[in-house]
Amino acid sequence: MELLFFLQGFRCIFQMTELQPLSQLQETDELSLNVQEMQFWLDKAVAWGQADSPDTRKDTCRHLSRLRNFLQQILTQINNTSSTAEIMKKFPLLGQFLGRLCWNPYVTVGETSRQLLFQCILGLYTEHPSNAVEKKANQWIQKVLCQLATEDDVAVQALTKHMGVPAKEYHVKVLQKMVMWLKENVENNHSSQSEVNQSILSGSEVFVPLATFPEASPVIGALLQQPMTSISDSLNEDFFDALSSSQSRYGLQLEKQALVSLWCHSLPSLEEAVLSLLKSVTCSGSAAPQNLEHQVTKSFLPEACAQHCSIFLVVSDIFRSVLKQNETSQPVRSVVQTVTRCVLRELSLLQPQTSLKDFFPQSPSSLLVPLLTMPSEMPQEALNNHLKWLSSSLQRLAEDGDEGCSTRGRHHLFEAWFLLVQCAHWVQMAVQLLVTSKPEDRDPLLWLLTFYHHPTNKWHQRALQLVRVREAWDHLHTLFSASVFPVPAAHLQPLITLLSVKPQQPSPAPSLTLDLLVHFAVFCRLKLNVSASILQTVVDLSGLRDGAACVLSSLHLRVQEGSCFKSGDVHLRIRELQKTITQMN
Amino acid sequence: MEAVLKNVSVTVELLAVAARSNAVSQWDEQTLSRAFHWAKYCEHIYSRFHNNTAIRRVMEQQLQITNQSLRHVFPGYSHVSFSDLRRCQHVLLVGLLNNPELPITIMKTLFKTPVNIINNDFEDVTGICSHLIRCKSACKVLRPLSALSAVGADAEVQGEMLMERLGAMLSQGNELCRVEHFLCSVLQDSEGAVQHMCLVIAAALLTAKGSAEQTASQDFLLEWLQSRHNLLHNLCTMLPSAILKELAKGHQKFRDSFCHMLKKWATEMEYSITEGEWINNSTNTTVTFQKLTEFFLLLFEACPSVRRNTEEEMRLFKISDGDFDVQGLSVWGDLLSELNK
């Protein structure tokens, strides 16, 4: 919940710029100012209607957002006034103004402005007219709307009538034809100097109201894929803003490359994409790991990040901000790790290879390569030492960060932790190794896990947490190397206690303990049925079936990918354990 | 079949009621939805049977009877033709919107923003007007941007529609006079838009030749054009030169008619001694000597083989004019020297 709230707040920052109503003026004397405003907008509508030139088109499109706000005000006013006669008395120009807007295609093409306009006009209709003004208004409303819907020029009327083609079918065909013609011209004339392209690019404002038009997306996509310089010069910010908001509100579908291009130009649309990915993962509760990877790939973000380092940097910054507010959120950490993994995979496919340093400019350079290396790229016997080294390096940074209390030290520490989250495959490897570790080897690995789960050492409790984790590990170690079966219930109790959440008492993240438990069950040397019975009892008594199933399936996925070393019949053991857990009631 | 005829007849009556009766004031959303359902039924009947000449004839007869009886009930009633059935929902909509008794609740339904913007195929009556206006507005917004295209999207779509209709009529074995009548009535109804109709015809002739049906339609159209001197004259004078050139390149028949017309214009020219130039004396054309030269050059560029024959012909005409190499004596001599500058 908290995370959702935060995400919404994050988005608000970017939407605030959109709303610039004339409301400051209006509050003092609503009536007279509205009349003044009405005159302003009527003058505008008259000017727009008088000449169809590139300048009037531009002016119309630039005013659309303010016009929508004004129409909203009018609608409120109409709804708050008791009769049409009364409102016509207050605003004699209202009818003329609304009528003129009806014939302005830039107003009637946009979903919101068209809807507001029709609502205003229909709001003026009086069901039981009691005077001449209202009767006249009713007639006018019907006439205007009828003309608007049915009027076409002579040739169109003659041809559609004689050929029996419905008007809608005809207009849809014309629209498709124009869109394809424009698309082809934009694509084929890469020199922005060509006459056609000049005219299209300089008229790009018209695509602002068309951004809500899925039918126009081919030409919008083609415009977005123009060479950067020509579009940055010609397409204006309104266009990108409109695209970005219509993507989220109307589901505008863009092709992959057009989308990437949009992200390059429009920060809000990139933020929207990242936040919606985070939202979809955090909302789905226990996100299945397979789905997560699918969702991440489907968002095209990894490809975009690999193609444009700048996109990756922005995405990372958003992740940083979200993680700073929600350091304990496992879904967010999973998203960060998955995105990073997918980006690295995309990068490895690109030629020429880019410098990883550019993608991780803030990460501690000594840790960068060791963490970005995949465990599968290393001999199995070197893993333990590698993890030990990582742990001690991080510990040193933590000491500086914790004790120095300097902003710089804390910043370094955060960046190191953030990189660890991005490369959480090493954390997962540490959990796996802990199953077979000797007691004297466990401490560096346990410290690494504690740091991963509790990066900020609030109230200097990392030491205490470390003690608890050690305790958990000791219990697990004893349980899974025991020789007496069945294990007495009393032996399981301390573990169950550790697994339960106690908000008052700082304890190691239950998820960490659960992680360890599941890994022990999979990788221990006990027979499968024994191991399964321990897991089943503990998970059952602590009510963590779903959590355990999730850990198991993500482990399964890692084994399939080959990102953790396999020992013996690990596939079989995971499958059997999954079965055991899901059969429980 | 009888049931179908009856349904169609009843729907046509419904269309008349929707457009003209005050009973519409009692309509609610359910009535509206049912009315559109019946209109859709007629569209379905059209698509099912329009290729079947026998059934088509029967239906046309039925429509005639229904139209006749409706004319008695509603003065000023405009009849519903068989091809109107193809756009029955649209006819219903236009009728309703023009009926002063249309209740505001229905108006509101029609002008709401449709829920599904893209695939609103009249599945739901809600917002059909809004959707129609949305499409029309988008076309208007994009039109200035696509103004640089040769014939324009409108004429192109209309040209395609024309070809499609001609193809259908010809392949159904309609008598040629019937098809000609169709072309004439289209032309007549679009009298105010002569230049645009020229573009439509050009677009129809320029649609990519694919099927035999299409070639047949284009041939028919060209044949028909040859007997319509005014229209041909308008085509030659009103179409942009790039399109004229394309037409001359693509169609021998058009090339011949065009060349014939140019020669006719040339014979109509007289030399004005006071102004020192050739002037067209005919009342129905304003083509100047310079324009005529340009047309000839355009024709030669479109089809270089025409040049030799035409110039040869011009030389013969020049000889018959006395074969003087003095400006102002023979229009052919002057054209030849102008063309070979």
Image (spheres, coloured by chain):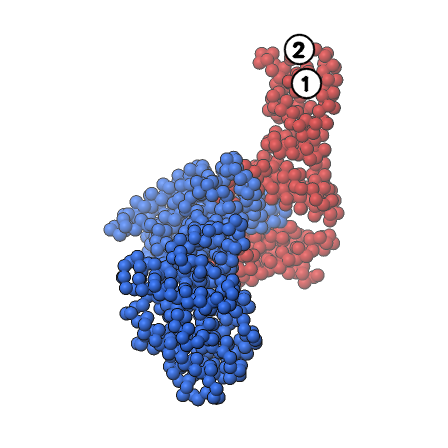
Chain colours: A blue, B red
Which residue is under mark 2?
Answer: B326
**Mark 1 or mark 2: whose residue is earlier in sequence:** 2
Identify the residue at horizontal 51%, vertical 84% (top origin): A530
Q: Give the structural element (helix, strand or loop) at label 2.
A: loop
Query: Which quadrant holds the C terminus of chain B?
Result: top right
Q: Give the structural element (helix, strand or loop) at label 1.
A: helix
Identify the residue at horizontal 63%, vertical 42% (top origin): B159
Callout 2: chain: B
Q: Position of residue A100 (x, y in %)?
A: 42, 44
Three-letter amino acid code at disc 1?
Answer: Leu
Identify the residue at horizontal 39%, vertical 44% (top origin): A62
Identify the residue at horizontal 62%, vertical 59% (top origin): B41
Marks 1 and 2, how far apart in space? 12 Å
Residue B336 image label: 1
Whether labels 1 and 2 belong to a single chain: the reply is yes
Callout 1: chain: B
Query: Which quadrant holds the N terminus of chain B?
Result: bottom right
Whether residue A415 is situated above or below residue B140 in the rendered picture: below
Three-letter amino acid code at disc 2?
Answer: Val
The extreme left residue here reads A28
B126 and A140: which one is in front?
B126
Q: Position of residue A85 (x, y in %)?
A: 34, 52
Q: Position of residue B315 (x, y in %)?
A: 73, 17
Quarter of the rendering containing residue A414? bottom left
Whether residue A94 is situated above or below residue A477 in the rendered picture: above
Q: Is residue A268 visible?
A: no
Residue A196 image label: none
Packing grade of label 2 (10 A; few <14, some 14-19, many >=20) is few
